[in-house]
Amino acid sequence: MKHLAIKEILARIHQAGQFDELRVTRDQVHEMFREHLLFAYSAELAREINAIHDSLIQRTIVLAEQMLEARGMGRPPVAYAFILFGSGGRSEQTLWSDQDNGLIYDERGDGSGEALELYFSALVGCILQGLEVLGYPPCQGNVVSSNPQWRKPLSSYIEMMHDWFAEPNWENVRYLLILADMRCIYGTQYLVDRLLENMIAYIQQHADLLPYLLSNTLHHKITLGVFGHLITERYGEDAGGFDIKYGAYIPIVNGIRLLSLQAGIAASSTLQRLELLKEGGYVAEPLTDRWRQAFEIALKLRDNTPFQVEEGMYMTRSKLSAEQLTKELRAELKFALRVGMDLQKYVKKSLESKEAIQREKG
């Protein structure tokens, strides 16, 4: 797709005055990109898809602010950051990604805590209404800014995070790893930077957390059989297909994220994390190159899973169909899975070595 076309699409999004206009643009862009994905996937194409998602979400937030101003609620009373988690936070969205988002606001400035909560509750109501019009389904795990857990002042986020650190059970560690992928898509970046800095500093100072982080990270295993065969879906409409999201993509993403946290790297995208792991000398270049190859294969195949539109929402089950699993694709996928298995072993060994060093120091 020509760069000029992308500039035109982004300009059209920026000029939209209503959510319905944004939806029309998204539908048209979706079909255009879908055709390109069917013929030739590229890293550049994936970046363009994410740039358009970012632009759609940013324009939705601007329109939501305008809606509140028209209601007489004024402009945002304090600085805030609208943040994306999951694939959005990592800048790895597919054409049909859902909503995983939150909102952090600054207590400094005018307005009581009650007034701030009233404003931002109304704001996220408008934002999420707009995102649903655009066809973004809400996160099934309720990691979304309409949930007060993910909409609060910076100090409350930091307090919540330290509560999770103090009691690192399975659910709390899951939340911590969700936070690790956050990215400011609109608003004041320093609010996100402060939270991430606090998180990374704590992990660096408390090596006893690593076993808990490791357990959650390795929860999703690479789905390759002991004899090197693909483990495909056995039943239902996806029978014979392969779960690319949880069988390949998520295990690779999780492993690289944990190595990055261990190294004190604040970047949220998997490719940035790999580059910084290599540049910082934390992982040898041949390894990061192989991991990059495997990750890019998983990302490409995830972008090619079948999708459907249900009640206006773009949805996918993140599974390659049996028909898609050609001999060539199977070979490519098996390479990514073998590398992914090696990555998971490396992560486990790396963290266990760090634990041993900490014990000796203690």
Image (spheres, rainbow, N blue to C red):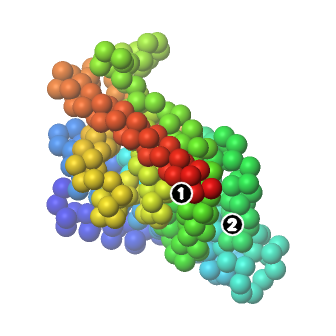
Q: Where in the figure is residue 164, as x and y percent of width and height?
A: 70, 53
Residue that appears at 40% across and 72% down:
15
Q: Which residue is mark 1?
A: 180
The three-letter code of the residue at mark 1 reads: Ala
Q: Nearer the viewer, residue 127 or 83?
A: 83
Query: Farthest residue toward the top?
Result: 235
> Is residue 83 placed above or below 43 in the rendered structure?
below
At x 33%, y 20%, the residue is 230
Circle 2 is placed at which residue position? 158
Q: Which mark is residue 359?
A: none
Quadrant (top left/top right/bottom left/bottom right) for the C terminus: bottom right
Q: Tell whether 78 sits left or right of 137.
A: right
Tell me which amino acid carries mark 2: Ile
Query: Could you say which quadrant of the image residue 47 lies in?
Result: bottom left
Residue for point 49% across, 56% down: 262
Percent across and percent down for residue 137 are 54, 45
> Could you tell me residue 126's position as x and y percent?
63, 62
